[in-house]
Image (spheres, helix red, strand yellow):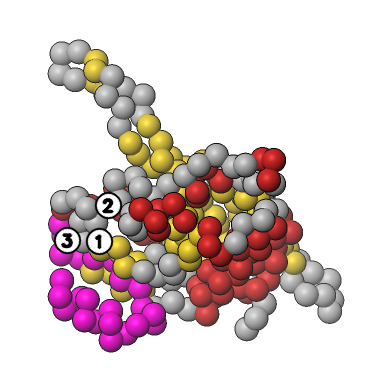
Amino acid sequence: MEDIEREREKRGKTMRFHYRAGRHFLKVTVPSRQHETICGDFFIDTAQKLFQMGLTKRNFRSVGSTTYHGTGSGDNGGSGQGDSAFVPQARCRSGQRWPTFILEVGYSQALEGLRNDMRWWFAASQYEVKIVLVAKLYQATQEIRLEKYVKDVSQVRTGATHTRNTPQLQPRLTQVVTITPREAGPGQELQFTVVGAPLILEFRHLFLRAPNLDAGERDLEYTSSDLEDTASAVWLSD
């Protein structure tokens, strides 16, 4: 573990690390330009939406690819770095440093690997993480698939002889958005079709409180236009 931490310090932000203690497995990701572009574009869009509600940078913190250490045993232990992370003011003040929102991006990484990372964030934080957004980039087709996961509670757990009302926490997929290119006419720039928009990030999950509707606070809504702009930034900058 100490060797991993030293390597992180040496490499800085040029790599992402996920370490699973139970399997002694270390995954290293080298972010591509597309990888970093979607992270930066998404955070700028998020910050603009929050500022338009009257919130300021004092109300939240972007903690980027900060390293977090799991609180459990086995694969719930270890450590991980997200591609982007959000911590509300209330959690900063309390010393509870787990973010409420994590963005996990995959360019060369398979979608199932991203889902494994998603599950780790929820379990390792004991569900202090409230939303994980998975963004899979498909280089060959220039598609983007977004999957939003939130904390969920299963119904009941069946015991050996009777049913006990012991709900179990688990991640739940609540939204899928796909952004795919469409054919453009001669001389026209590539355009995109968005299915499943708007993408919604619930205010109560991000800030751990209900929005003040009278003050203009509300859920964050990423429209088809927002997501088309993000896809353009990712794929049309080469």
Q: Quadrant of the N terminus?
A: bottom left
- Point out residue 114 in the picture as x, y percentages from the top left corner: 40, 59
**Circle 1 sits on which residue?**
69
Q: Is residue 138 visible?
A: no
Label 2 neighbour load within 10 Å: few <14, some 14-19, many 20+: many
**Horizontal placement of 129 versus 40: left or right?**
left
Residue 207 shown in magenta: no
Rendered-image quadrant of the C terminus? bottom right
Tell me which residue sits at (48%, 66%) in the image.
62
Q: Amino acid at mark 2?
A: Ala
Q: Of the residues shown, which amino acid type is indicated by label 1?
A: His
Q: CA distance from mark 2 to mark 3?
A: 11 Å
Q: Secondary structure at mark 1?
A: strand
Residue farthest bottom in this picture? 10
Left or right position of 118 against 135: left
In the rendered image, residue 132, in percent from the top left (x then y), is placed at: 44, 52
Q: Which residue is mark 2?
A: 124
Please state the extent of the stretch shown in magenta in the rendering: 1-25
Q: Residue at x 65, y 81 (%)?
A: 237
Q: Quadrant of residue 233?
A: bottom right
- The earlier-in-sequence mark between 2 and 1 is 1
Residue 61 visible from this viewpoint: yes
Q: Verify CB contact (< 8 Å) between mark 2 and mark 3.
A: no
User: Residue at the location (71% across, 55% down)?
Assistant: 224
- Image position, residue 65 (x, y; %): 40, 70
Relative to 169, does residue 126 appear above or below in the rendering?
Answer: below
Question: Is the C-beta separation of discs 2 and 1 under 8 Å?
Answer: yes
| Residue pointed to by mark 3 | 21
Residue that extends furthest to the top in the rendered view of this protein: 162
Please state if 223 lies on the left or on the right of 199 as rendered: right
Q: Which one is earlier in the sequence, the residue at label 1 or at label 3? A: 3
Q: Which residue is more in the foreground, 57 or 4?
A: 57
